[in-house]
Amino acid sequence: MREGASASHEAPVRVPVHLGVIMDGNGRWATSRNLPRFEGHRRGMEAVRRCVRAARELGIRYVTLYSFSSENWSRPAQEVSELMGLLKRFVRHDLAELHASDVRVRIIGERASLPRDIASLLEEAENLTRANTGLTLVVAFNYGSRQEIASAAQRLAIEVAAGRLSPQDITVERLNASLDTADIPDPDLIVRTSGEQRLSNFLLWQAAYAEFVFLPIYWPEFDHAALLGALEEFARRERRFGGISARSGSARP
């Protein structure tokens, strides 16, 4: 994966083309301040705005935000309802600004089971910004990577059963082309806040050669400085993609 050029004198020498973000810790941020969990989610939306703005300024081309996983439906009904309300307000209030800033919005995740009003909002965001050529903001909503991979395998199996495809034709490239992210480059860097160090079913296939940075701050605290710190760490990494280290001359994974 080729790194993009920096668009700001404050940026490191190189920045990722594609940044993935696991936005974690809204509830814990609120609890630590004796605030309702909803306030943590509301402040988390402010962090989303800061992240997208900073990514645009720094020249990052793709940002994928893990906004709502397929497992999040198991949360208390009131919290899920509040999260859906925040999504609606974000689309209604922020979509025009994103569109004016030439941001293209993409949604990945399962949509068939979504409430009609939510599905319509997501479709509206994609349709309005489809022709934009600036930053691509990928929102992983009702998303789970294992289900994404399983669905891709099912689609290929249907093609094989129908005689339109042979099992030998199922290659890494063909499976990749069947994923939700088929036309999106793999992430170069994945950042997770809250101090947790796991992917939590986020872009499992696509993250095969991603670099990881785990930040000890909660998502509502994420700002331009936090992003710069993660990018500085990324810039120090030597990315070999299974090849040979230029420094040591030895092959490493």
Image (tube, rainbow, N blue to C red):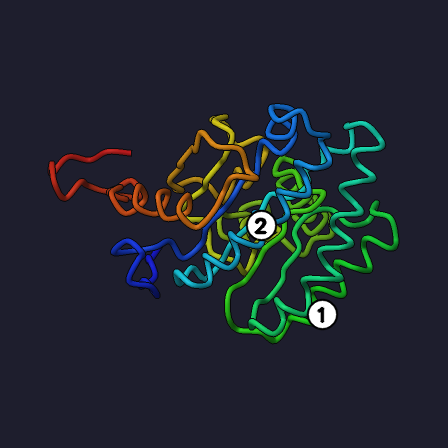
Count how many numbered circles sit on residues in the image: 2
Percent coordinates x, y for residue 54 in the rendering: 46, 57
Q: Specify whether 187 is left or right of 3.
A: right
Mark 1 element type: helix
What residue is rendered at 57% in x and 39% in y? 220
What residue is rendered at 82% in x and 60% in y? 120
Q: Is residue 154 above or below residue 89?
A: above
Q: Is residue 187 visible?
A: yes
Percent coordinates x, y for residue 93 in the rendering: 72, 62
Determine crowd level at label 2: few under 14, some 14-19, many 20+ residues with C-alpha closer than 10 A.
Answer: many
**Marks 2 and 1, how far apart at CA:** 21 Å
Percent coordinates x, y for residue 60 in the rendering: 42, 59
Dot placed on the residue nearer the N-terminal end, 2 or 1: 2
Q: Specify whether 117 is left or right of 163.
A: right
What residue is rendered at 53% in x and 33% in y? 218
What residue is rendered at 66% in x and 36% in y? 40
Q: Nearer the viewer, mark 2 or mark 1?
A: 2
Percent coordinates x, y for residue 237 in the rendering: 26, 41
Q: Is residue 97 above or below residue 211?
A: below
Q: Amino acid at mark 1?
A: Asn
Q: Is residue 153 visible?
A: no
Q: Amino acid at mark 2?
A: Val
Query: In which quadrant of the rendered image does the C terminus lie?
Result: top left
- Residue linked to disc 2: 48
Q: Nearer the viewer, residue 218 or 158?
A: 218
Mark 2 element type: helix
Q: Nearer the viewer, residue 183 or 150?
A: 183
Q: Nearer the viewer, residue 13 or 46?
A: 46
Query: In which quadrant of the rendered image does the N terminus lie?
Result: bottom left
Marker disc for residue 127: 1
Determine crowd level at label 1: few under 14, some 14-19, many 20+ residues with C-alpha closer than 10 A.
Answer: few
